[in-house]
Image: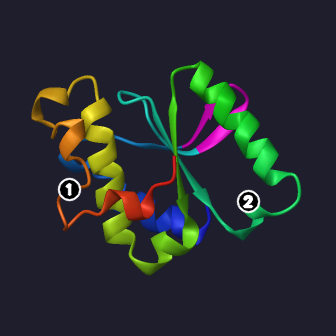
Amino acid sequence: MSLPETLLRQRLRCAPDGVKFRRQHPVAGYNLDLYCAHAKLAIELDGEAHDRGDRPSRDARRDAILAGLAIIVLRIPARDVLADPDMAAAAIVASALPLHRRLRRRSPSPGTLGEDPAIPAASFIQE
């Protein structure tokens, strides 16, 4: 695992707010950096290599295949995780809660997601 993946994994492995993530989870021939099965949410950390060569088109194709399986993909720049791993982890959990099948009743409504200034989800997450 890369350093940004390790930093996030350290923060998410204790299942914050009841949201459990798997690392390097295989789906449709791809290994997802982090995956929450109950929310059908994939987290992909994008380093500099994701902007080069054919990677953008490969990533788009992969995202389309995952979308066909009803999996939402959140792309987070690795530099943002390195800058503030705690905030990135909080934003990921805040994004997963409204999608989580078993925790929906406890989660904030999708309309309030990102409105808490302590968790600026939009600054970390690229859909």
Residue 37 visible to the viewer: yes
- Does residue 50 appear to the left or right of 100 in the view shown? right
Quick one: 22 or 105, which is closer to the camera? 105
- Does residue 30 appear to the left or right of 8 in the view shown? right
What residue occupies the far right of the structure in this picture? Answer: 53
Q: Amino acid at mark 1?
A: Glu
Q: Amino acid at mark 2?
A: His
Say whether marks 1 and 2 touch (CB < 8 Å).
Answer: no
| Region of the chain picked out in magenta, as a range | 24-32
- SS for callout 1: loop
Compared with 54, 46 (above or below) is: below
Compared with 101, 110 (above or below) is: below
- Does residue 22 appear to the left or right of 58 in the view shown? left
Q: Quadrant of residue 46?
A: bottom right
Magenta region, mostly helix, strand or loop?
strand
What residue occupies the far left of the structure in this picture? Answer: 106
Q: Is residue 31 magenta?
A: yes
Q: Which residue is mark 1?
A: 115
Residue 26, image x, y percentages: 63, 33
